[in-house]
Amino acid sequence: MRVILWSCALAGVLAGCYLGGVGGDAPPGADAGPDALGPLPFTADAPATYVAKVKNILVGLPPTDTEVAAVAADPTQLGVLVDGWMKQPEYATKMQRFFELAFQQTQVAPSDFIDQTFPIPIAPENNNSPPGPDLKLSQNLQESFARTMVAFAAQGIPFNQAMSTNQLMMTTAMKAYYAMADVFQVGNLVGCGLGAGSEQAFGIANPQIKSISVTATQIPLSETLDPSSPNYMVWYNPKFASSSQCPDPYPIAQAPDIGTPAALYDLLHGWLPGALSYTPCAYSYGAPWTPIIRDTDFSDWTMTTIVPASDPTKITHFYDVPALRTATQLTLSIPRVGFFTTPAFIANWPTNASNQMRVVMNQMFIVATNTAVDGTDPTMPPSTPGLDAKHASDPACEGCHRILDPSRLTLATTYSWNFGLQQDAKWQDAGAGGQLFAFQGEVQNVSSIYDVGKALANHPLLASGWTQKLCYYANAEACVTTDPEFERLAKLFQSSNYSWNALVKAVVTSPITTHAAPTVTATTNGEIVGVSRRDHLCAMWSARLGLANACLLDVSAPSPYPNNLSTFPSVIVPGLPSDGYSRGSAVPVQPNDPSVFFTGGIDNLCDTLAQLLIDDASPPPGAKTWSSANAAAAIPEFVTLVMGIEPSDARYATTVQLLTAHETAALAQVGATKALQSTFMVACVSAPAIGMGM
Amino acid sequence: MAMTRRDILRASLFGSTVLGLRALATGLPASFLANPRTALADPVCAATAKAQFVIFNTSGSGDPINTNCPGTYFGDPGVPQGLYHPPDASMAPTKLQLAGKPWTAAAPWAQLPQPVLDRTQFWHIMTNTPVHAAERAVLELNGGTMAKEILPSVLAASLAPCLGTLQPQPIALASTPLYYQGQALPLVPPFALKYLVGPLADGLNTPQLQALRDDTLNKIHGFYRTSATPAQQQFIDKMANTRGQWRSIQQGPLATLANIPNRYSADAQIQAAVALIQMKLAPVIAVDIPFGGDNHSDPGLATEVATTSDTTGVSGVGAIASLMQQLQAAGLADQVSFISLNVFGRTLATNGNTPISDGRDHNAYHQVSLAIGKPFRGGVIGGVGPAQVDFGAVPISSSTGVGSSGGDIQPIDTLGAFAQTMLAAFGIDPTVISNFPTAKPIASVLA
């Protein structure tokens, strides 16, 4: 259709004549009714459209002429192309972000972790410029499980192991945090009643530590960590200033003492323990100094196996950082299973003495099966261990408690409300009469948190649930679950032994995504052409413009923007529609209409990008840049790279011509730099650039 | 004479001399391009005189608004014994007058100015769910609205043409997802508005350059539209619509947006809501004013107390007082109503297996909605009585609004009655809400 129209198109546009749409002579707007009138009649998308869509979904890059031509000649070639795109690093980047959201590991700040090791923060606060260790570790913790799943997918490990794995991608800083949390467990109440008792857990695991001292005299770390050395547990810290009242070395903690692990953890991050602030021992901040846990310890990702500690004296030492750097195994007493025991998930979904793990369990069901407990599950377990009879006696509450209470019992018997080990005898014994997993028709006896992980991994709704999550990701809308094509995809996922890449390939090459042929989903919902939501948009800009962290979504990474521009994306991006999740809901919130706010936000972001990338004397490393001295070369690239319209597309030449005309007209008003920047803005805010499915 | 930005826009994107060209290029009806502020809204305004802007407070946390308000203190008409209130001095039972009738409430409520109290209603109603995720269902009035539209959007669609707002869709400033005609609406952080509503003040945003960009964009979109599928055409049209709307935003009040603090909290939301109404951007603005949150575990009810009695404007009654003060200062006190509807309320006497003094459970049977504004005569609508293991809403008399066992509106229909009364208050046909057998608007409580 484009080929037929394009030859007269430019003349028509410039002359103001309406050229007619796909449907022929229909008057403007007649074929694009409002949503309220129901779905539009199905119209198949052309290869140029769906190749662009699929490639954008998978890697954020624009299609090439060759790719579109290959699919136009033989639609089965899309699968071949997808195989190639899935090998590109951008695919891992996009999947990582998808997994971060889908496994609900995001939407947390450093302060949200505090309950798990109260009062020890995940890392000492720092100012945010440059990002401090707290922001870096918080980012590590949010990325960890997603990175694990990306690695699993690359290795062909069945996806459903996400629910029960004891492996995690970890950095050294993370390993130290996990191991510290294991000996600084918080009980059912924050601030008091430390269930396991930090001094007991730490003391049992570290009977050889009698005291910890700090010195301003430089000594090798190996001596500090060597129990046979006279300098054992004497920590070098040049910030310490000795005095007559504070001789060097100065003991800062005696074991067993509740402050011992806290003091040790602070030292690793270069901080002197807070207790020193309240003594006559002044200390100075002095010259820059590299702490024990250094910058590279936040980026040395390693697949790590977490082994349950059968002996409480064999817990991995969190303070032995050199050993942690090479460790591929941690021995911990707190069971770490699947996606739902990561500190990030727990920080997202804290529980308390009243809720008693119900919210955690419900979010686990939502992540694993895309189904929430809402009182409509007809499952009738043969018994209901852990049932809160008082609550369940209320008919309005019975439907939820009947499902949630037995299933969360294993969580409650294993973990304290702050995810130490459960030390309350009442709860430890609560499962003695038997524990049960009961959800959406699946009922089985369980005896450990590992069994719960396996029950989730084997749940019949896992395959359809994750297929549906990909429907949301690709199309910003649920697939119709009775659509035979949807059923085929879910079955394929299951029969492939939960091959994640097989499912992704099947979904993006399916007419459910391409709209190359009608499906029940398409005819029921209509085709959704919507705005690129935040994560697609940001990945697209990063990939196409060479701008790592284009939207500043990674708060621990450097900003590509200079100070005079960085405010804008940091303020605007939170206002862009995202794939965020909310409590108790299996349906992500996915606005896909171009609202007034989206329009304004994108305009201002494109304004910022234009200033960053055109005639900038010091652009960020690796960024795609243009010079107004060569606008004739820049404008075609705006069309191909920013708008994703390849040269063989019938719309290409006209688009270049319209943008060139804009640049020429702008030159009459402003200088060459602003003229080209304005031209970039037009391309950047245009429908092909920001529309998914254009 | 120098051209103003509006002059440029008028002469370009929406200029009468080129309307036909723009319509042809974009495929948009000329009527829309001529007047984008009203073209997308329901063209029928049935209640100009009664129409109000609405600030709609809603939360999925089930905050304890219902626990310390008028209608929950023994000794007042119809209030049973046994309802627990935190003993903290800042929440001391205090007498107040609602449109001339005496009631008792926690002290913070009594600190609202008398003119505000005289137009403040406390609706004791039942949402019939203890599930957080049912918030959308509650806003859909549990199946009571047409086409599963949520109440804020029902109000917005009807009020927009009367108020002449830029868009008919509500604006969500808080974390509750809103929907309009089936479409999810963006969650807009209040602090982001300054760069979402207005263009950056730089050399790329001279009126002439903006007009030139809009013109090029229109040509590109008009061109792409010629070969687009219906779905793509629809998207292009929506882009053109919203761009036109964005360009027509009044620039004057933008300075107010720049002063919104860099946070999500209620004080920032309220400041943003008032500014957005001044700009006539939308008829309904959704906010979330905390009153203690999901306080299952709240030793001494300390969070409930602190949040409700805070006077800094970030939560509780203090935030409502701040809102009323800002509306008064903006000359909007008689044009804006405040309504609240949460997913559920909290228990009034029990907390499962732990004492009520240390937390409150979900209460499917009792939630208090607020209605504050010129259309409302202050008072307590409905009341409280025993329900299951705790307390719940009692039937309401449709003629007087009084709660008692003899009321003709059953508890299950009190949500519908509340919604219908809100519609009636704003001059909207209450019959757009159905499926409540005994629900009906309570006309006698309106001013």
Image (cartoon, helix red, strand yellow):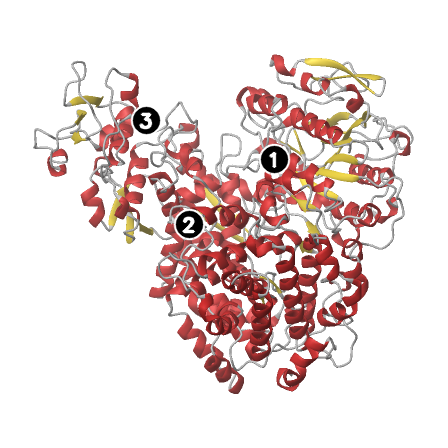
- SS class of the residue under badge 2? loop
Q: In the rendering, at what x and y percent does residue A410 appear?
A: 44, 41
Q: Nearer the viewer, mark 3 or mark 2?
A: 2
Residue B286 appears anywhere in the view: yes
Count the marks: how many?
3
Residue count near mark 2 (Cα–Cα under 10 Å), binned few <14, some 14–19, many ≥20: few
Q: In the rendering, at what x and y percent does residue A455 appear?
A: 45, 52
The reply to whether callout 1 and callout 2 are in contact (CB within 8 Å) is no
Q: In the rendering, at what x and y percent does residue A162 appear?
A: 41, 55
Q: Which of marks 3 and 1 is in front?
A: 1
Q: Please give the residue where the numbered disc 1 appears in the rendered image.
A: B268
Q: Please give the residue where the numbered disc 3 appears in the rendered image.
A: A197
Q: On the same chain: label 3 and label 1? A: no
Q: In the rendering, at what x and y percent does residue A500 appear?
A: 43, 65
Residue A458 appears anywhere in the view: no
In the depicted view, which residue is nearer to us: B293 or B207? B207
In the depicted view, which residue is nearer to us: A283 or A501? A283
- Compared with residue A577, is residue B396 higher up or lower down, i.e. above or below? above
How much space separates mark 1 and mark 2, taking CA atoms? 28 Å
Amino acid on which disc 3 is placed: Gly
Q: Which residue is drawn at 69% across and 28% down?
A: B320
- Compared with residue A162, is residue A231 higher up or lower down, i.e. above or below? above
Q: Please give the residue where the numbered disc 2 appears in the rendered image.
A: A562
Chain at numbered mark 2: A
Chain at numbered mark 3: A
Chain at numbered mark 1: B
